[in-house]
Amino acid sequence: MSSNKSEQSLHIEPRRSPQLALILLALHGAAMGALLSLPLNSWLQFALAGSIIGLLVGSWQIYISAQSKKSIKVLVWHEDGSWTLIIDEKKSVEANLLPSSFVFPKIIVLKFLTEHRQKYSTILMPDALPSNLFHKLFLRLKFEV
């Protein structure tokens, strides 16, 4: 996936991110607030509120607590540009970085597709990695992909 080969692989083991947790809570809280201000039947509001809560729980399990089958525990970006995703102690998969991934100085969203057509994603905030690793990852993604 990389046109320029790097001199070393990157081993990325994200920590829990309080910044991402706050963003998830704020966004889902804002959605709940917007829902409550809409003139809808109470049963419809209740159903939509349940959906918002369900999405929050699912996102929390994948990206914050890493308790989902879709949670990436460790990423390895090899010298040749290939990626290995470690999902749990018994499962690691080779994956391709998708072009729908995006990179900004304060947030990196990586989306992957495995050879078995399974999709995985991870959201990396600056507080999830050592600052030098976050910066190195940001630069390599920005200039090599």
Image (cartoon, grey):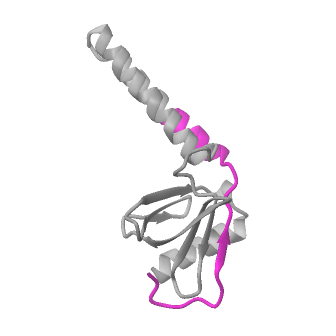
Toward the viewer: 79 or 117? Answer: 117
Q: Quadrant of residue 98?
A: bottom left
Give the quarter of the figure containing the C terminus: bottom left
| Figure check: 83 above or below 28 | below
| Figure check: 143 above or below 121 | below
Q: Residue furthest left?
A: 40
Q: Is residue 6 magenta-colored?
A: yes
Count up the numbered dots: 0
| Figure check: 38 above or below 67 | above
Point out the stretch of residues depicted in magenta: 1-27
Residue 84 coordinates in the image, percent (x, y): 56, 72
Q: Is residue 8 magenta-colored?
A: yes
Q: Residue at point 61% right, 73% down? A: 76
Q: Residue furthest top?
A: 42
Residue 29 coordinates in the image, percent (x, y): 49, 28
Q: Residue at point 68% right, 49% down? A: 16
